[in-house]
Image (spheres, grey):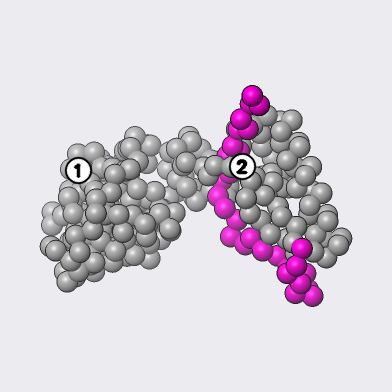
Amino acid sequence: MPRPRKCRKVCCLPENRVFLPSSGCRENPVILTVDEYETIRLIDKMNFSQEECGKYMDIARTTVQQVYTSARQKLAEALVAGRPLKIEGGEYRLCSGQEAYCNCGGCKRHRLDGTQGGRVMKIAIPLDDTRKEVCVSFGRAPYFLFAQEEQVEILKNPAASSEGGAGLQAAQFVVDQGADALVTVRCGENAAEVLKEAEISIYKSRGNDANENLKACREGKLETLTHFHAGYHGIR
């Protein structure tokens, strides 16, 4: 029985996945797989060696060489023959965000040292009326704390008094404020989808003290929140 192929770790999916020649032709495209794209990004854009690329993608250097060679040949075919290029498929898994550090500069998933692509990540925490403790309700929290390096601000949650859909509105508020991570007691499924779509990591708070949770998040000591409750459908 053949040995199963190991999925290659990929930082994140490319923002642009279709490239067309000036003629606009869409027929007979060259298909560059996502893992092939990643080797191009890491080696040619980020200046990784093949050994470093293999370590990041969790595959052998010889495998990197094969994937990279295939990718370069496909790029050459698209450029020389004037064929469309599409990035799709392949055997890969997305970065979980749980590594000590992404080390590739392109990942929007959150590293445990509190940085993101060289900048300190912005952390959001729902606060209760004391403005010091984590609110048990995400959508109905009176306030949100947003912290990035030494800059900390506490803003009123515009969704707190909403007739319905508070979780979704609060999630969008967190997204609009440019947060990279959220620390919360719990979160609804719909709100979580909004946050995940924006690639915001969600962590489970530990204890009530907001400052302690902020410190723990920056030090990578909080667990990822994996259970999300069903929506309350407007019931307060």
Q: From the viewer's perspective, is 73 left or right of 12? A: right
Crowd band around label 2 with a 10 angstrom C-alpha radius: few (<14), some (14–19), many (20+): some
Query: Looking at the rendering, which quadrant does residue 19 occupy?
Result: bottom right
Q: Is residue 6 visible?
A: yes
Tell me which segment is drawn in magenta.
Answer: 1-28
Q: Circle 1 is placed at which residue position?
A: 209
Instruction: Residue 91: give its label.
Output: 2
Quarter of the image with the N terminus is top right
The three-letter code of the residue at mark 1 reads Asp
The image quarter containing residue 216 is top left
The mark that comes first in sequence, 2 or 1, is 2
Pointer 2 with pointer 1, Cβ within 8 A: no
Query: Is residue 177 shown to the viewer in this render?
Result: no
In the image, taking residue 226 as reference, residue 72 lies left or right, namely: right
**Does the magenta-highlighted stretch encompass residue 225?**
no
Measured as percent of width and height from the top left, residue 122 is found at 39, 53
From this view, report whether residue 47 is shown above or below residue 55.
below
Q: Is 166 or 92 nearer to us in this picture?
A: 92
